[in-house]
Image (cartoon, rainbow, N blue to C red):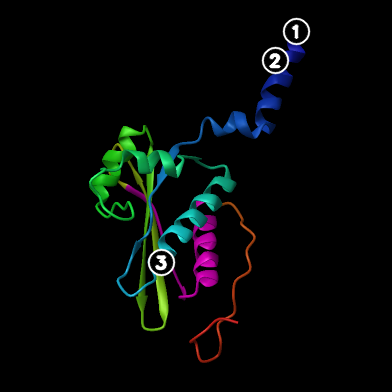
Amino acid sequence: MKKYFIILPLLLLFIPSARAQDNPTIAVFDFDLGSNLDPKLKISLSRELTDTLVKTNKYRVLDRGKISATLPKNNPGPKIVTDNDNALQIAKTLAANKILTGRIEKIDTFCHLAVMITDTETGEIEKMETSRSACEENALTSGIKAMVSTITKVPIIYKSPEISPDKTRIK
């Protein structure tokens, strides 16, 4: 009988699904894009952010469809939440402990990315990370993966694109 008390805790340590239940639930909202960027980037980069976050096993990530279903039905076009207070209310409705929001701005020839994790109970920003990259989708994807790696402290393998010497395109 004593050996079961020793083996059971050891097994739970090595079973990721058992540990995942202890992880906070997070709702990932679409990026807020600057006006001079392609709107299609918002969805693809938000999905990349969600996928990368799921792979870290640090959070239980809410399904994007579940989040979209709670957004106001009178919002024409793509369903977006730009107001942090609205995002917090939606996350609370879905019983999420945290929200992840982000912004991408194009300044000159580069894009500046920022993501932040906010506690839904206190409204406190717990983590924030920024990055700068070329404005092509591959470069932005690498920047997102690097930020998630920094925020979660989980190494994520990604290939960082090389920026040309004149700093106008990636190789």
In this view, the residue in front, 126 or 84, is 84
Q: What amino acid is found at the position of numbered circle 3 in the picture?
A: Leu
Mark 1 residue element:
loop
Q: What residue do we see at 67% from left, 23% from top?
A: 9
Is residue 122 in view? no
Tell me which label, 1 or 3, sits earlier in the chain: 1
Q: Which residues are magenta?
A: 125-152
Q: What residue do we see at 64% from left, 60% from top?
A: 157
* Relative height, residue 105 to residue 4 (above, below): below
In this view, the residue in front, 40 or 125, is 40
Question: In this image, 119 relative to 52: left or right?
Answer: left
Mark 3 residue element:
strand
- What's the CA distance linking mark 2 and mark 3? 48 Å
Q: Which mark is residue 1?
A: 1
Q: Which residue is mark 2?
A: 5
Q: Which residue is mark 3?
A: 113
Location of residue 17 in the rendering, given as x and y in whole percent from the top left corner: 61, 31
Q: Is residue 75 magenta?
A: no
The quarter of the displayed image where residue 122 is located = top left
Mark 2 residue element:
helix
Q: What amino acid is found at the position of numbered circle 2 in the picture?
A: Phe
